Amino acid sequence: MLTARTLIEAQTYVSLVTAADPEAPAVVPARPEPGVNVTDGPDAWVFASPAGEITIPYASERAATTIGARFGLGKSQLIDAAQWAIVSASFARRALDADMAYTGAPDQDRNVVELNWEFAADAVSEAIKFLADDADEVPDAEIWSEYGRAAKARHPHLVSRAKLTDDLEYYRGTLEDFRALYKRS
């Protein structure tokens, strides 16, 4: 059985697997919902997803929530470094589109912009976890999915330290700029 560090990591994994599968239906995968597709176990939830059953230990979710680690503590054993880089780029595209459309009008939801920039930064931070302290890029062994390997083949610098750290700086900086421009009243 697959194990995720948090419910949101499990949901991200399911989205990646269904997006990478040409046989999968072109629908948004179901979100984890207690009593519907998430069951309580003695020490973990079990998420019955289109990608298979995924276990999410309560202790892992609680620890991640306590320190604000959206996707979990430590390196993912479910999503590889290249996949995290792809996820971060997807959130960044959404954030940029929402940011460009945002004018500060009362009927607009600024949270859409902020959350997408936050998710982009958090996802690229997950990819950075796969870098050894002295490495210039994530080793191939840390890219185990076919989807991740294909993405790295198309974009050789996808998981280089320079690109990942530049992306993180850009996402965080753009979020700070957005918040400074549109201060909450």
Image (cartoon, helix red, strand yellow):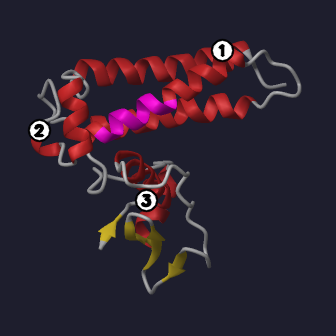
Residue 10, label in figure: 3
Task: Please state if 70 lies on the left or on the right of 108 as rendered.
Answer: left
Q: Where is residue 43 in the image (x, y as percent from the top left)?
A: 42, 81
Pointer 2 local density, CA inside 10 Å: few below 14, some 14–19, many at least 20: few
Which image quarter: residue 82? top left
- Element at badge 1? helix
- Tell me, yes or no, if residue 159 can be seen here: yes
Whole-angstrom CA distance, mark 2 to mark 3, is 23 Å
Which image quarter: residue 101? top right
Pointer 1 local density, CA inside 10 Å: few below 14, some 14–19, many at least 20: few
- The residue identified by callout 2 is 140
At x 14%, y 23%, the residue is 136
CB contact under 8 Å: marks 2 and 1: no
Check disc 3 and give the amino acid type: Ala
- The residue identified by callout 1 is 100
Residue occupying the far front of the picture: 23
- Tell me, yes or no, if residue 129 can be seen here: no
Pointer 3 local density, CA inside 10 Å: few below 14, some 14–19, many at least 20: many
Q: Position of residue 141 (x, y in %)?
A: 10, 44
Dot placed on the residue nearer the N-terminal end, 3 or 1: 3
Q: From the image, which quarter does the N terminus lie in?
A: bottom left
Task: Please state if 154 lies on the left or on the right of 19 as rendered.
Answer: left
Q: Name the main secondary structure of what is drawn in magenta.
A: helix
Check disc 1 and give the amino acid type: Met
Camera-side residue of 68 and 57: 57
Whole-angstrom CA distance, mark 2 to mark 1, is 36 Å
At x 48%, y 22%, the residue is 171
Which image quarter: residue 183? top right
Camera-side residue of 72 and 85: 85
Q: Position of residue 169 (x, y in %)?
A: 42, 19
Q: What stretch is highlighted in magenta?
A: 83-91
Whole-angstrom CA distance, mark 3 to mark 1, is 30 Å
